[in-house]
Image (tube, coloured by chain):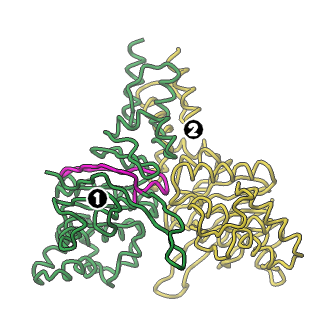
Amino acid sequence: MQIVFDNVNYIYSPGTAYERHALKNISFSIEKGEFIGLIGHTGSGKSTLIQHMNGLMKATSGHIYFNGADINAQDYKLKELRSKVGLVFQYPEHQLFETTVFKDVCFGPSNLGLDKLEIELRAYEALKMVGIGDDLLDASPFELSGGQKRRVAIAGVLAMKPEVLILDEPTAGLDPRGRDDILDQIKKLHEESDITIILVSHSMEDVAKYVDRIFVMNQGELIFNHTAKEVFSRISELEEIHLAAPQVTYVMKGLKDAGFSVPLDVTTVEEAKNVILKLLKT
Amino acid sequence: MEMIKVKDLTFEYIRRDEDGNVESINTAIDNVNIKVSKGDFIAILGANGSGKSTLAKHINALLYPTKGSVWVNGLNTQEEKNLWDIRQSAGMVFQNPDNQIIAAVVEEDVGFGPENIGIPTNEIWERVEKSLKAVGMLEYRSHSPNKLSGGQKQRVAIAGIMAMKPECIILDEPTAMLDPDGRKEVISTIRELNKKEKVTILLITHHMDEVTSADKVIVMNQGKVVMQGKPREIFSKVDEIKSYRLDVPQVTELAFELKKAGLDLPEGVLTVEELVEAIKQLKKSK
């Protein structure tokens, strides 16, 4: 088990009028190489949760283990943890600052005390992983399109060679094609390496299409920790907390309510198509 | 009566070097013609960089045409004397609510616009109350804006525009930074304003599910208007939509795939209910 949360609580401003219990008794474990989707409302505790994973925030109580070691132990090296758990914030392109794409991606690894050759090799590989071609290496990051900028920013984190990559809404503000490009690239990265990915998203359709397991947060609690199919087949429970299933799942529910025998755990267009074609044949 | 008329509009971003020589010309809008009638709800779809924001900025005279012309409420945007009338009749809401809110209390923020155009105090308060009511934020009038959710902030920004009594509101990706609940709040507010207050709406977005209730959808690609029509007509052309880096709602795509597989379904299915109903009919007729 790579990441373990054991009864983690976090309280903002304890003892003051602004006290808020942001994480409530969170326990879970994530295996190396998993692809996790994290969904929940603004204010549900998603961001607080991911900031605990690389030690940016310290739990008020409970324990967090990374590769078996307690990250809040006295002698634990948090700096090392942060190079292993890469966090890509929302709108990461706002953090680009160098004069060229290549230099920007080199910035992270050059702070790890590596030699020049290794730094450049990592930057080159990272850019390749996110699909930025050689022709853009010397371009100014500010001349790129929104989707390209975002991929360069993600490459900057990948060049640190993290074991875990956490992406906080990596597709916000991109057009549909830009969104698919980034998510496909992340999926490819996951398939070609043993990196663990945690994707924070508001889009149920995207989560259903890409991840192995879904965490659903609500008011500081982890209320679901299941496969996409299990989570989305519980439409009424999701609606109670103002979340929704993908549209195709609702089509299934509509058909079931109309008396047809169809499964509810359908989450992609392809699956739904097959179910409906089969239904009409019989 | 026409609210907005865009005729043969071309706009070029010209980049110059230090000596003022032209380095490059980027045609952001390429010979666009659009007519919007009073009371219409128009959605403009387009990928990043397709020119939709540049077009919006022409409508309240933040940018001027390189070629062609733009009329708002019969006023030409290129005549300087029309500027204030145009900005008053066409209000604009931007992507990030945090950049649009300036006061420490919600009602003061909404009153800022009318105060600037010299409206008497009594009437300002009347307008503030009416606008906050129209966007469903009246109970928050004495709150601090920075404690509101993204969707609530965006509704306050819309109330600020409403207080100017515009005939038309242009919203440039108003939901891009909001979560699903915030998006729903803002979109239903916009619909209400269109229906009840008869405000002409121009909604720029790349969320396909937000445009299904528009009267007309305009699709832009590389500075040109490439498709125009009712949502149903636009969404029946799934392959063409996708070629412009856009997408259709998931249920529309499912219906399109089923149709391709030989099922006799109607064109451009927009909602889950429509598709379920159509499948029920097919099953019955067997």
Q: Amino acid at mark 1?
A: Thr
Camera-side residue of A101 and B70: B70
Camera-side residue of A151 and A14: A151
Residue of label 1: B189
To which quarter of the image does residue B81 belong?
A: bottom left
Q: Amino acid at mark 2?
A: Thr
Residue of label 2: A268
Q: Is residue B105 magenta?
A: no
Residue B4 percent across, percent down from the top left: 22, 55
Chain A: colour as depicted: yellow
State which chain is coloured green.
B
Q: Is residue B175 visible?
A: yes
Mark 2 Cα-neighbour bin, 10 Å: few <14, some 14–19, many ≥20: some
Q: Is residue A137 left or right of residue B135?
A: right
Q: Residue at x 66, y 78 (%)?
A: A57
Q: Give the distance between the C-alpha atoms of the residues marked 2 and 1, in whole angstroms.
A: 30 Å
